[in-house]
Amino acid sequence: MKKWLLFIFIIASMMVLASCGSSESDETDSGSEDLNGQDEQGEGEQGEEKYTIGATQIVEHPSLDAAYEGFKAAIADAGLDVEYDFQNAQNDQNNTSIIANNFVADNVDLIFANSTPSALGALQATEDIPIIFTSVTDAVDAGLVEAMDQPGDNITGVLDLHPDAIKNTVEFIDTYFEGANVGLIYNAGEANSVTQIEAVNAAVEGTSLSTVERTVATSAEVQQATTTLVGEADVIYVITDNTVVSALDTVIGVANEQDVPLIVGEPNSVKAGGFATYGIDYNTIGYRSGEMAVEVLTGKKTTADIPVEYPPNMQLFINKEAAKEQGVEWNDEWDEKAQFLETETE
């Protein structure tokens, strides 16, 4: 009898142990499911990755602003979740380095450099954070890249000067203002501007035109420089110089008052009151820069994989109202050749 009781006790103990093991196994399996579920839920809550872009711009004026808006539009169209840190250097090149160093300290995911000084400041600040630039006239001459098809390890972008823009503009002046003395106003401290002035003078060679130059260091000097051209220049030509364009209203005022045709470097300056330009759309080059940024941020390409690009197209823009204000004799040929823009007032 005692043997039977002992046998029953052993069998019962084994059944209890088996039951406990099964319960523990179930709990372990249940815990794994919960953990996996939490992981999947966490990924779902994060969604797509969020990026921080530091945007640095030498000064605020319509052309650069349009490029920045185009850049952001391309990012938005791609559906990326981006937080922007926009910094304006207030036309002080020293500020571009401070801004770029702050972006590096904040470890932003990408820097959008809108102008040559801004791009130079960013490149000097980092060799690691990718930089996409625009509103740069000559990236090679400025020292940003070795060649158009050889972008840097962390920098590439879109230029703001079509290869034929200055040549076509000079031909326009030579054709319709034959023998004119062309007044040029620019900041000699901007590499972007020096390159353009050299191109203008080269294009003038062999034409009926001549040039006279005035240099400025700040936007406050622009009006005085323009005034000194009155009586000496038959036409004023303002290239895409950030210092001068930021004070373009003062140049327009002198041109209107003194009946001097004002040729400008891009369409936004025509909308501001310039007479004519062979120019490009800054929103377009900003948008293309944004597309480059998307490729870099999402890991599809590196900056080294993306050659520097010229603006996609260029055409003649004319402001009829400005032509009248500046005493320009209308030529019927322009009705067929030009796209007309109206003066936009704030």
Image (tube, helix red, strand yellow):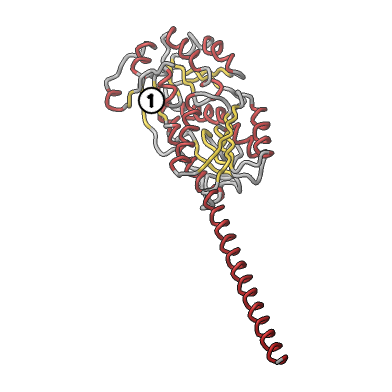
For the residue carrying disc 1, how many other residues have a C-alpha within 10 Å: few (<14), some (14-19), or many (20+)? some
Q: Is residue 130 left or right of residue 173?
A: right
Q: Quarter of the image holding residue 342?
A: top left
> Which residue appears at 54% of the width and 56% of the height?
40
Q: Position of residue 254 (x, y in %)?
A: 47, 10
Q: Quarter of the image holding residue 320?
A: top left
Residue under label 1: 172
Residue nearest the viewer, comparing 36 with 330: 36
Question: Is any atom of residue 89 visible in this view?
Answer: yes
User: Quarter of the image containing the C terminus?
Assistant: top left
> What amino acid type is highlighted by mark number 1?
Phe
Q: Position of residue 322 (x, y in %)?
A: 38, 15
Q: Position of residue 210 (x, y in %)?
A: 47, 20
Residue nearest the viewer, comparing 87 with 179: 87
Q: Is residue 136 left or right of residue 276?
A: right
Query: In this figure, what is the number of numbered marks?
Result: 1
Q: Quarter of the image holding residue 323?
A: top left
